[in-house]
Image (spheres, rainbow, N blue to C red):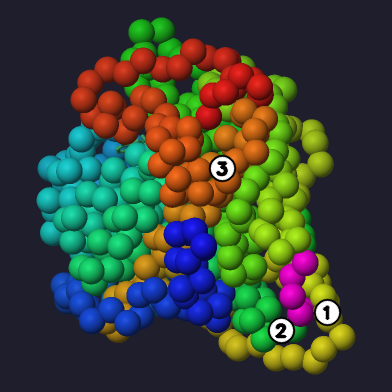
Amino acid sequence: MSHTESKILGVSRRNFIKGAAGVSALALGSRFAHAAGSDETLKVGLIGCGGRGNGALNNFIEAANIMKKKVVVTGVCDVFEGRCKNAMGVAAKVSPITAEQCFVGFNSYKDLLKTDCDYVIIATSPNFRPLHFEAAVKAGKHVFMEKPVAVDPPGARKIIEAGELAKTKGLGVVAGTQRRHQAGYQKQAAAIQDGVVGEILGGTVSWCGGALWLQRQNPNEPDAEYMVRNWVSFTEMSGDHIVEQHVHNLDVANWFLGRLPKSALGFGGRARRETGTQFDFFSLDLDYGDGVHIHSMCRQIDGTQGGVNEFFRGTEGMIYGGGKIETAKTFTTPDFPDRNPYVQEHVNLVESVQAGKPLNEAYNVATSTAVAIMGRISAYTGEYVRLTDVLENEGSKWYNLALAPTALDFEKGPVTAPEDDVIAIPGRPKG
Ligand SMILES: NC(=O)c1ccc[n+]([C@@H]2O[C@H](COP(=O)([O-])OP(=O)(O)OC[C@H]3O[C@@H](n4cnc5c(N)ncnc54)[C@H](O)[C@@H]3O)[C@@H](O)[C@H]2O)c1
């Protein structure tokens, strides 16, 4: 049995499948509850003040209101000063911050982590996540980090490792795979656990939609800044959209099946992008073992059929992710807070920390990210790729695949962007 399998099977199926409050199988027993300042005042810092960073800070504030707690923002940081100013506007709602509390540049997270926050929200592009998460855990902070959490195999493994460290330090870790905090999905996970649809035999998961933003490099603009602005077209920054968006649906498959796929075989291509290195579409066969296969597909092309969903067929019924359960059986499901999951995930983080039972979702989000990376490698190369190639097998040619420029390269000085509009060609290996 592989390390990956044994790690999953070492957790009881019930606890693995419960997710959110129940992900806690790996963390609930923690004897090291971290003293998170005063229980009544939540001190938070923000790394990455873009759309989601500001959104997550707003969600954190709303969660605090629900819990009747105060929020103090200890600082914010971003590569761009203007972005920090936007976050200052959000902070001003609860605790105005000064220019001295706004840190700018690729090293700014280090200053942010020196501030007196107990919680850190990390919402940069995914390529920086492993470095920033590890630093936050080492600094003793509870973390909310956006998905996905890596763009390459070493990054995914670093998240798992730092997640383990967080456990030993009694730190809470919640990831932005918010379906695990969404009542509709939580009820379905409980129903599956209770055998309401029997054994899952197969399914489909998809994220098909339109194009995200197109950015071109400005004259004289450093490559680093261009890549940060245009991160949704560079695999080196996002992992490609199979990792960046579709990880949500892949995570649901892993959660509902209670295990990870063993391998992927897939394909994809590029039809409309003009910048960066990403594909526009992917289609994968994920082999979960025991004859169970999940079809995964994702696309970012305007004017094409959209659909963001998960569907699973069991021996005794069918599950439509977040919605219907079709079965002849009568059943009831437990109640879960039916709030905006983008807010509920912060409620769950803080409440778990304050109860001395910190949630730790690092392993779940890292492995779902690794599954997406496995699929991307298969589509880029045309090869059959095993999850062990990404997570365990040091002899695999994919194990040490590190996309460049790396997060550390950005810190050290100027970087050189990969050539625009040059993509992987299956049959000519390049992860
Ligand atoms: N959970 C969800 O549903 C959801 C939705 C949207 C985005 N996201 C995720 O949130 C993350 C951010 O996405 P976004 O849409 O906010 O992107 P964005 O480009 O709007 O924001 C990213 C911000 O991070 C800053 N940044 C980049 N590198 C940095 C560094 N090294 N140090 C400090 N700041 C840095 C950028 O300048 C930018 O302001 C992504 O991982 C994305 O996948 C999740």
Quadrant for residue 183, please give it.
Answer: bottom right
Q: Residue under label 1, please give it.
A: 316
Q: Residue under label 3, please give it.
A: 374
Ligand 1: give its quadrant.
Answer: top left
The answer to whether the residues at label 2 and label 1 have Cβ atoms under 8 Å apart is yes
Residue 270 versus residue 260 in the image, above or below: above
Residue 422 versus residue 253 in the image, above or below: above
Can residue 366 be seen here? Answer: yes
- Circle 2 packing at 10 Å, graded few (<14), some (14-19), many (20+), is some
Residue 187 versus residue 415 in the image, above or below: below
Q: Residue under label 2, please give it.
A: 195
Can residue 42 be seen here? Answer: no
Residue 200 part of the magenta segment: yes
Q: CA distance from mark 1 to mark 3?
A: 31 Å
Left or right of residue 138, residue 30 in this image: right
Q: CA distance from mark 3 to mark 2?
A: 30 Å
Amino acid type, mark 2: Gly
Indicate which disc, 3 or 2, sits on the residue closer to the N terminus.
2
Q: CA distance from mark 2 to mark 1?
A: 8 Å
Amino acid type, mark 1: Glu
Magenta range: 197-201
